[in-house]
Amino acid sequence: MNTLFITVGLLDIFDILLVAVLLFQVYQLVKGTAAINIFFGILSIYILYLIVDALQMRLLSQILGQFIGVGMIALIIVFQQEIRRFLLFIGSTGLQGRFRFIRRFIPKSFQQFGKQFIDWDELENGLNELSNTKTGALIVLLKNSELKFYIRSGVQMEAKLSAPLLTNLFFKNSPLHDGAIIVKNNMIKAARCILPLTEKSDFPSHLGLRHRAAVGVTEHSDAIAIIVSEQTGQVSLAYHGNLYLNLQIPELMKMVRKFMNDPERINN
């Protein structure tokens, strides 16, 4: 009499853990968006296919197998934004980990090379003035991402970042006050830039387009977005698709400095 049993080895456990981590990361990317329902639907069909295949129900198994095979092409189309975000997450996480390891063997004098420079005093003074006058603003600070497409969508500039320039650009009667400004290496590259809006279905309804655009641009890049509310003068911060609302300016500046130097997220 044959005994039916399943043997589980270390490699099987490792395989299961990898799949679990992968599914969790995919869930994190689509959580709060309309794609979450599609994700659960596809996962349910795949689990059903595994059960049907294990029970050797050949006809149904073949139908579901063909559906899954053809569905992979549809998935690439439906989830193109989520796939892009996932690949960006994998690439940036891997590179950041390798760079941290390499930095241990590099003298500190050389580690500053390639880092983005920002005049923190000018930025903080500008934010204080914008907040006190309740002048709406959206400022994007670049790290590794170039965002050339969004820079080209605005008015090209090559102006040094300063508090008076920030307040003048976002002044209500200024022709450049709409949209975002993009800053790299302490230079304002462009103003009145058009940014992508987040598609999160659970995004707070009381927040306007500036906040949506700030989250949207940080979902697809490692940029940092600073928002000044036109209604309240409150300042907020977006990074990696996370939104930190109603911060005190010293607290916001501390977070921006950390994000610029350390790509890891701050825990809420």
Image (cartoon, rainbow, N blue to C red):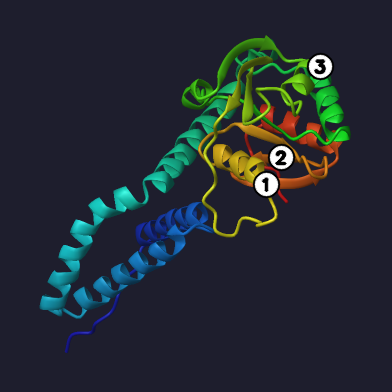
Q: How many marks?
A: 3
In whole angstroms, how far apart are the C-alphas of marks 2 and 1?
A: 6 Å
User: Along the line of sight, which residue is nearer the eye, 44 or 56?
Assistant: 44
- Kindly state the secondary structure of the residue where label 3 is placed: helix
Tag 2: amino acid:
Leu
The residue where tag 2 is placed is: 237
Sequence-first tag of 2 and 3 = 3
| Whole-percent x, y for residue 126 in the image | 81, 24
The residue sitting at 43% across, 58% down in the picture is 35
Q: Which element carries disc 2, helix, strand or loop? A: strand
Counting from the top left corner in percent of width and height, residue 57 is at: 15, 80
Callout 1 amino acid: Leu
Quarter of image, res 121: top right
Give how far across and how far down residue 9 sits, in percent: 36, 63
Residue identified by numbered label 3: 164
Residue nearer the viewer, 71 or 2: 71
User: Amino acid under label 3?
Assistant: Pro
Q: Which callout, 2 or 3, points to the residue nearer the camera?
A: 3
Cα distance, mark 1 to mark 3?
Answer: 27 Å
Which of the pair 186/89 is nearer the observer?
186
Q: What residue is rendered at 30% in x and 48% in y? A: 76
